[in-house]
Amino acid sequence: MHRKLIRLLALIGIAQIVFIASSQETVRLGTPISESQLEGFDLIVAADGSGLPAGSGTALQGKAVFESRCQACHSANGEGTSGNTRLVGGDMHSAGNPIRTVGSYWPYASTVFDYVRRAMPADAPKSLSDIEVYQVTAYVLYLNGIIDQYLILNSETLTQVKMPNRDGFIDESQAQ
Amino acid sequence: MTDKTNSLEKLEHVAGNGLINRRHLLGLGLSSAGMAVASSVLAADNSLPLEIPRWSRQPGPGASGYGSRSSHTEYMQRTAGNPNPIYPGGGSSRSPLQHLQGTITPNSLHFERHHAGVPDIDPSLHKLVINGLVKQPLVFSYEDLLKYPMVSKIYFLECSGNSGSLWGANAADGSAQSIHGLVSCAEWTGIPLSTLLDEAGVEPQAQWVSAVGADAASMGRSVPLNRAMDDVLVALFQNGEPVRPEQGYPMRLFVPGCEGNISVKWLTQIKLSREPSQFRDETSKYTDTRPDRLSAQFTLPMGTKSLITSPSGQMALERQGVYQVTGIAWSGRGSIRRVEVSADGGQTWADARIESHQSEKALARFRIPWQWSGGSAVLQSRATDSRGNVQPSRSALIAEKGSLGRYHFHGIQSWSVSTSGEVSNVYA
């Protein structure tokens, strides 16, 4: 009799725990949304080129955009005014502490597009059109001698640009 | 005074240059290193009779809707750099570690690092989106998220650039705050990210999660999915109150133990993908160039580390006697199991007492008594975590990693004490 009662109480206890656990799991308040609804919201341009928008631009076109929107901080030819503003030059294999720039350090051209579109110009982020971002990206790559001034940068050609330091990184994300 | 002198002779010295067994901590009248605080009580002339102070003779103001600190503690400030016109809103502020006690950083003094300033977010308009390699992309409102089961955990947060000046060739003058103030610790309350990812349904090809903030820089970072499914939170509360604007209001990602930048503030998007997005702040920044000129990327857990916060740089010992040496220790891979302290530049070491619950990926507070007899000394601390990782000396760290990197410094800090009692940063 006792044993049955204990078993019954135990079952009730388990049932309550299961009920609590399942009631927590059933909080599902996310509202479904489609990727097309997120086109203007999801700015991520990844290294595989996913997320690159329509449009294109050349360095030749980018020069004017750079001069009006970027040059005040990055100076003419992207040589920089201080600290992090230098965009060109450097060599990872130079003696001493190498100068790390888009040209010498950044492993992916997609990152230039992604960063310029989301965060630049620093005083008015997201104020450039996608076309202008393609143009400025092409100009910065051109200043580093990575592409010529006529290359039409678009979602296909940008992904094919191989940066000088492309193989210069070790992924430690799974190191213990 | 006689009692104290007698007891000093009985103290058990456990390491060179005056370190005393930690079991004596509670029985001693300890001196503390001088700070820029005028202490009228200590300065009182002992020959005068004590009187009832003026604040005991009239009622003070009543209860208030929101508390404030004593006007006598306003010297405790974060140090923020000057605004940089070419980097609007960018920069950092550092916690005043040398003034803090215990392990929890007050929210007003938690360090900051912003990439485009603090956005003024209306929570009723803020969205959190989960998309990419999921069965069903979802959008959550702040109100939705407040209804989810939450967990509360105490975790440290450390910028991976913290202590970075110690990679430099020369030991610059500095304080615990100016050198190491990009670390803080709080109780974070939020929703396990895995709960929300499960709701959206992670596709089997997904390996990475990109997190993006709603600040003007739309700061983004990629998190390995195995870590994202482990102990990562969407944090809504910090030390019991809604996360403050400078910490990510209304919500931030919180990746325990990992470099602070990956705990994306003002979290607005989580996107699942096969590969990392290779954002600017995980390629150009927060990466460490090695002597072979390859650069380590996604170096996420912060190293086993400790730091004496008192006595520390720019303080002064005002008289000979017994001091309480105290500091903080932490590890991105576990809890703190042991902290040793040296007063002779690392020749001999003694175990400090570790206070508080030694929880995973949180600050621990350590203390040990030390008798300063007026000679020169070099104070150091060395932490060991629950996985057996031992904090390296600065020279051992540089021998292993080189000195081309700028982030993830976790070597031993040396504070020199001069014969006149001045404490300063040195390499030893």
Image: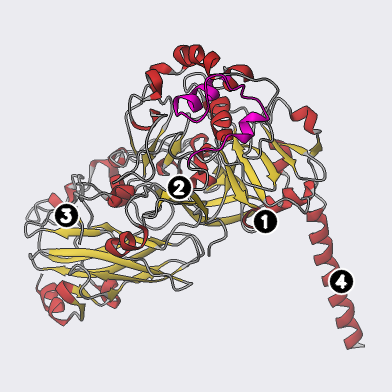
Counting residues from the N terminus, which is met first, the one under dot 1 or under dot 3? Answer: 1
Give the percent coordinates (x, y) of residue A41.
69, 28
Depth check, front residue: B262 or B12: B262
Q: Amino acid at mark 3?
A: Val
Q: Amino acid at mark 1?
A: Met
Picture residue at 59% right of the left edge, 28% below the top = B121
Q: Which residue is mark 4?
A: A12
What is the C-alpha distance between the residues marked 1 and 3?
A: 45 Å
**Which is more foreground, mark 4 or mark 3?**
3
In reply to whether residue B112 is colored magenta, the answer given is no
Q: Secondary structure at mark 3?
A: strand
Let me know if marks 2 and 1 both belong to one chain: yes
Q: Which residue is mark 1?
A: B229
**Which is more foreground, mark 3 or mark 2?**
2
Pointer 4 with pointer 2, Cβ within 8 A: no
Let me know if marks 1 and 4 both belong to one chain: no
Would residue B328 be seen by someone viewing this image from the given angle?
no
Q: Quadrant of the N terminus of chain A?
A: bottom right
Q: Is residue B60 above or below residue B120?
A: below
What is the C-alpha distance between the residues marked 4 and 2?
A: 54 Å
In reply to whether residue A143 is colored magenta, the answer given is yes
Q: Which residue is mark 3?
A: B423
What is the C-alpha distance between the residues marked 1 and 4?
A: 32 Å
Counting residues from the N terminus, which is met first, the one under dot 2 or under dot 1? Answer: 1
In the image, which residues are magenta? A135-164
Q: Amino acid at mark 4?
A: Ile
Q: Which residue is mark 2?
A: B287
